[in-house]
Image: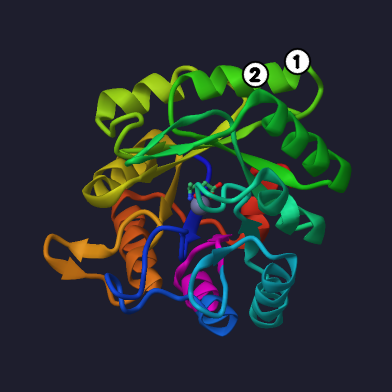
Amino acid sequence: MEKLIITAALTGAEITKEIQPNLPVTPDEIANAAHECYCAGASIVHIHARDEEGKPTQSYEVYKEIKEKIEEKCNVIIQPSTGGAVWHTSEERLQPVELKPEMATLSCGTCNFGNDIFVNKEGVIEKFAKRMQELGVKPEIEVFERGMIENAKRLVKKGLIEPPLHFDFVLGVPGACPASVDDLLFMVNAIPADSTWTVAGIGRHELPLAVMAIIMGGHVRVGFEDNIFYKRGELAKSNAQLVERIVRIAKEIGRKVATPEEARKILSI
Ligand code: KMH
Ligand code: ZN
């Protein structure tokens, strides 16, 4: 089995310091959290930027500062979000791709997102894919619903993304695909055979789906964007604490953890 790629989704766009006081929001906090997660065993950090008031921003400048600060500390794969927050315009969302990071997310469809709608029209998805292709940025295809896999396959047919594809199944978002074992299998069985995949279980689904992925040969995403608790009723101390647990479980199950260099090879970056 391939080594395990652990992604740390450090901040997200929805969580606040009020509900998770250890949430990294400033560029320094995000870079420190990225470094801690790298030291713990993460090979990818998924980044959402915040402005000086702590609100989600897709500002090129803020992402640049975060990227530079992380690069000063370690060679972890930096994966900015192009999803941003549900209220960002597509122009805002695309800005961090201009930094030519090794990877960026590419959400491949529209879905309910709690009481909001996360809008990704076909034309916007294609525009994002094209720009990533032009700049040599590897897309991580974010899948919140089954149909999004078909949208990604259409992008391949149109020559806008190239196999091997890398998928992230985000399961358990209220209003989108739930997070049962059957849901995960349904997704995994629908992707092209040469693809790689990771799973991001939301809230209490994070840990069981991560364990499933470790066993199945998939990869794992954990972090405050998806889940702020270490266990029921107990907030996590840091993103790194969540990464450390995955490393321990992987070791117990006999799955080795990938370094960033190994992750680059697995993902054909
Ligand atoms: N914040 C969500 C609306 C991504 O990073 O690409 C979208 C999201 C996906 O988090
Ligand atoms: Zn995200």
Residue span colored magenta? 33-49
Q: Residue at x 60, y 29 (%)?
A: 195
Depth check: 63 or 193 in front?
A: 63
Residue wearing tag 2: 153
- Residue 42 falls inside the magenta stretch: yes
Q: Is mark 2 within 8 Å of ligand 1?
A: no
Tell me which amino acid carries mark 2. Lys
Q: Residue at x 46, y 65 (%)?
A: 11
Q: Secondary structure at mark 1?
A: helix
On screen, residue 44 versus residue 181, left or right, reads right
Depth check: 9 or 19 in front?
A: 19
Q: Residues within 10 Å of mark 2 (few under 14, many from 20)?
A: some
Tell me which amino acid carries mark 1. Lys
Residue 5 visible within the image: no
Rendered image: mark on residue 157: 1
Image: 250 above or below 53: above
The image shows residue 159 at horizontal and vertical percentages of 81, 22
Q: How many marks?
A: 2
Q: Are marks 2 and 1 in contact (CB under 8 Å)?
A: yes
The image shows residue 134 at horizontal and vertical percentages of 88, 41
The image shows residue 188 at horizontal and vertical percentages of 44, 25
- Residue 136 falls inside the magenta stretch: no
Depth check: 83 or 92 in front?
A: 92
On screen, residue 252 versus residue 161, left or right, reads left
